[in-house]
Image: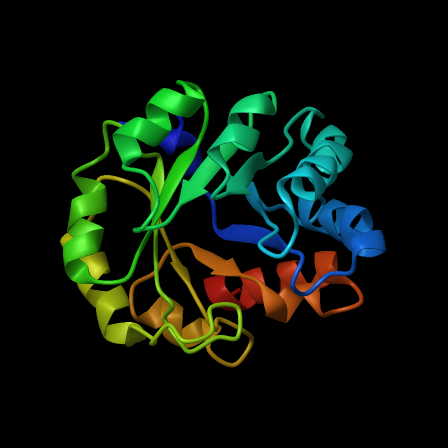
Amino acid sequence: MGSLSNRLEDAVFYGILDTGYVSRENLYPKCRDLVNSGSKIIQLRAKKESAAERREIAFEILPLFQKENAPFLIINDDVELAAEIPGAGLHIGQDDMPAHEARKAIGEGRVLGLSTHSMEQAKGADNLAEYLDYFAVGPVFATNTKPGRPAVGLELVSAVSAMNPTLPWFAIGGINGRTVESVRKAGAKRIVVVSDVLVQDDTRLAVKVLTAKFLGV
């Protein structure tokens, strides 16, 4: 099992700093909001930027993750950058390099996660617990964050929950204030939310409100 998976067991909210929703000048304050929201894990997703621009952003926000009790910083789909940044983890997709190669590239003591979109893929991810620290299941609902990818529905969330995976797993995709309770009722214990909190003026408060609604408190 990934050496850090146990530290994600009590994680509830996974934040993503997505440059598709946040302007360049607002990335640092928006990331600060996510860090201060209580998130235990935050991913930098910069799909439209060049490798050089992505690196610049990553090192700009890095000090936020070097404080005591800071969340884990995860780099989306850029293994070279993740390996370069002290302590950074990596998130990969089904079409990226195999988990064992990704683990070899970034080394031990860093969080490694994988996206899954079917029961077969979720089972496959859980069988890679030697390399992975978590996996994500989705998109639960259709989302502009992943245009063109069909929603997997709450049925997959329920099926994965019933599987009782070894690894911590997160439901992702189209989760917001209207849908979050149905995701919890389907069996998810952890969620990833992107646009619904990033577009709010006070992202820190938005995360706290949504997390409380998800937990039913």
Asked whether, in this view, residue 68 is left or right of residue 192, the answer is right
Asked whether, in this view, residue 192 is left or right of residue 209, the answer is left
Residue at the image position 41 percent from the left and 19 percent from the top: 107
Which x, y percent locates residue 75?
54, 39
Work out whether residue 31 or residue 207 is closer to the camera in this orientation and state it. 31
Image height check: is 76 above or below 214?
Answer: above
Image height check: is 69 above or below 42?
Answer: above
Work out whether residue 129 or residue 100 is closer to the camera in this orientation and state it. 100
Image height check: is 103 above or below 204?
Answer: above
Q: Quadrant of residue 70?
A: top right
Asked whether, in this view, residue 123 is left or right of residue 39, the answer is left
Residue 110 seen in the figure: yes
- Which corner quadrant holds the N terminus? top left
- Total residue callouts: 0
Residue at the image position 44 percent from the left and 74 percent from the top: 181
Residue at the image position 53 percent from the left and 64 percent from the top: 217
Residue 3 seen in the figure: no
Which x, y percent locates residue 22?
73, 61
Asked whether, in this view, residue 74 is left or right of residue 199, the answer is left
Residue closest to the far right? 25
Which x, y percent locates residue 36?
72, 45
Residue at the image position 77 percent from the left and 51 percent from the top: 27
Which x, y percent locates residue 157?
27, 65
Image height check: is 22 above or below 88?
Answer: below
Scheme by which the image is coloured: rainbow
Q: Quadrant of residue 170?
A: bottom left
